[in-house]
Image: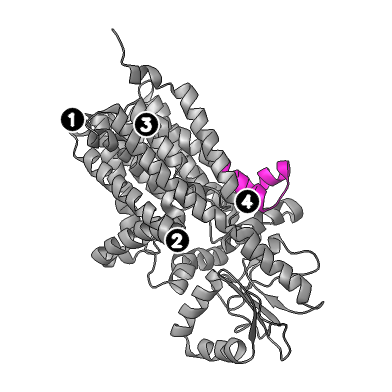
Amino acid sequence: MSTSPLRRAVRPGVILPLLCLLYVLLSITTATTTAPLPNEAWFFSPAENLIRHGYMGTTNLVTQGTWMEGIEQRTYWVPPLHILAQAAWYWMVGAGLMQMRALSIAWGVLALVMAFRIGVRLGLGRFAALSGVALLATDFRWVLSGSMGRMDMMCAALGLAGIAAYLELRGGSLPAATVAAHALIAASCLTHPCGVVHGAALVVITLCLDRGRLNFGLIALATLPYCAALTAWGVYISRDPDGFLRQFRGNISGLASEAGRSTRFSGLLHPWDAFTSEIYSRYFAQFGTWGGGRVFGGLQMYVLGLYAAAIGAALFHRRLRATAAGRAMTAASVAVFCSFWLLDGSKASNYLPHVLPWLLLLAAFGLRRLAGGQTGLVGLLLAVAVAGEAAAFAGWVGKNTLQNETVAAVRYVQTHASAGEAIDGGAEYGFFADAPMTFTDDPRLGFLTGRRPDWILLSGWYGTWIEAMRKRDAAFDHYVAKLVDRDSREVFHAGRIKIYRVSSSEPPVLH
């Protein structure tokens, strides 16, 4: 039987590694030009303390009087697996911001490979699965999220690996597939609570493909990895149960609700509001504002429109609806989308790595439907998407916020601050500060501690958090009005970073 030129050209053993290499190159470029996030420093601290001092405390945050109090001794507000993975990584390669980001990039490679296997096993075909990986590997949001030192890419990679393991092994041994898949999902949950969403996708796929083969024995096997994971975490929790409850419960809505208007699970009470926020905040804003400004962001909106049309074409195509594997693909994709729509009130862009693999696999399948099966037109549509992504990268990388904002701000303070002066700013500045200069990460600016800073670095995060809290707390608003508005003067401005000198004699303002 003859094969078409397209099928002969689709060689996953060659194309997939090339796509992974492209992703790595894009990620390195992004990681070395993007300003660090505050929570990169927060998640770095317990891992560094673990390898250097033997305890998992977060020591670069001021927590006095807050729900995070006690985090200096034990970090409970996030699950521990990402911290442990970092510690092992730093033991091998050394500790630092770029090492932290390199770990996320490595997990991103695994996620791409697992997304390909899922696409093939769920009936999309090798061409669509590779096209989906191509869209992922060059997607600005996927690369940017994976270039940050957060735990999202590790969580997504483990979750996708669990689903891929189930699809690969179910034909030989359903019990083995069940244990392997849920062990990886349990590890994903121990990395970040978003692992639950991957678990939900696995359950949906299992019901679509193997509902008739399920029994109580298999269900019991599926629960074993979670029992083991909770037992292992429980040993650490048992050292300070009250601290765990305070931190973990506080983080459910803590920082998200303090800096924004919604709590984590507000979508359950207001589903329509949550849906509109999901579309505008999770997608429109990320494809527009994050797309590099008006011109590059406008190009990204065309990409979003193309993806939406392709996903619609895929969802209603009879090929997917006609097979159990295709129905599993669409059902899992809908389940993942709806989980974030209803359960994540923060609408944070950090969580896109959990959704994008499903959406872009569907989009890749739908592009061929939109093109009427014409290979040349499919290639043209892919080229349009990749060109839009290239524009976003050009706009973002060109800003080089790491050097032009973060490093520039640190160098300014190093040049002008005197020894012993108190500097309030995000913990992320500590990645670039030379000893003995230290930054105190206290967005309340001493409101609860009574410590008056001499210098204040207001980043985008600090500014957003402070403005939100000023509207909610009259006493805090009065405090900031006196400290910042009256007693401080702006002496430096770069991008979203402003530096204030809390004194009567200041150097001139720099821009």
Q: CA distance from mark 3 to mark 1?
A: 18 Å
Nearer to us of marks 4 and 1 is 4
Residue type, mark 4 in image: Thr
Q: Residue at x 52, y 39 (%)?
A: 23
User: Which badge, 3 or 2, is on the more N-terminal residue?
Assistant: 3
Nearer to us of marks 3 and 2 is 2
Asked which secondary structure carries label 2, the reply is: loop
Based on the picture, tell me whether residue 93 belongs to the magenta stretch: yes
Q: Residue 22 appears at what percent x and percent y?
A: 53, 36
Q: CA distance from mark 3 to mark 4?
A: 30 Å
Q: Residue at x 43, y 39 (%)?
A: 160
For residue 428, say whether it is visible: no
Q: CA distance from mark 4 to mark 1?
A: 46 Å
Q: Residue at x 76, y 71 (%)?
A: 414
Q: Residues within 10 Å of mark 3 (few under 14, many from 20)?
A: many
Q: Is residue 101 above or below residue 40?
A: above
According to the picture, the residue beneath numbered tag 1 turns out to be 322
Labelled pair 4, 1 in contact (Cβ < 8 Å): no
User: Which badge, 2 or 1, is on the more N-terminal residue?
Assistant: 2
Q: Which residues are magenta?
A: 84-106
According to the picture, the residue beneath numbered tag 2 turns out to be 293
User: Which badge, 3 or 4, is on the more N-terminal residue?
Assistant: 4
Residue type, mark 1 in image: Ala
Labelled pair 3, 2 in contact (Cβ < 8 Å): no
Q: CA distance from mark 3 to mark 2?
A: 31 Å
